[in-house]
Image: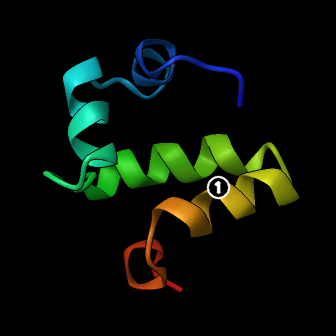
Amino acid sequence: MGLTQEKFAAKIGVTFPTINRWENGRAKPSPLAMEKIMAMLHTLGDRGKALLSKYFAEKELGL
């Protein structure tokens, strides 16, 4: 996506430490955060879908 964790966090309305916890598996995004993440990644087309499947299980995505 070309965003730092800080910029990505700002775009979806969370903090950098929150993004870091998600990436390290210490926490999971809230349903609202998942909606924002999915909306942002869907704008990237296939690349966004690949990122979603890489970082989130199907059950987290509601698939």
Q: Along the line of sight, which residue is nearer the eye, 37 or 20? A: 20
Quadrant of the snapshot with the C terminus: bottom right
Q: Along the line of sight, which residue is nearer the eye, 15 or 21? A: 21
Give the answer, above or below, for where 63 lies relative to 45: below
Q: Along the line of sight, which residue is nearer the eye, 58 or 31? A: 58
Instruction: Identify the residue under disc 1.
Output: 51
> Where is residue 51 drawn, in percent x and y?
64, 55
Please indicate whether residue 48 sits to the left or right of residue 15 in the image. right
Say what amino acid the circle numbered 1 marks.
Leu
The residue at the far right in this view is 46
> Where is residue 62 drawn, in percent x and y?
46, 81
Residue under the image location 44 percent in, 22 percent down? 5
Give the answer, above or below, for where 20 lies relative to 56: above
Please indicate whether residue 8 sits to the left or right of residue 46 in the image. left
Please indicate whether residue 4 sits to the left or right of residue 6 in the image. right
> Where is residue 61 drawn, in percent x and y?
47, 73
- Tell me the quarter of the picture where residue 49 sits: bottom right
- On the question of residue 4 being in view, the answer is yes
Q: Which secondary structure, mark 1?
A: helix
> Where is residue 37 drawn, in percent x and y?
51, 45
Quadrant of the snapshot with the N terminus: top right
Local packing at callout 1 (Cα closer than 10 Å; few below 14, some 14-19, many 20+) is some
Residue under the image location 81 percent in, 52 percent down? 47
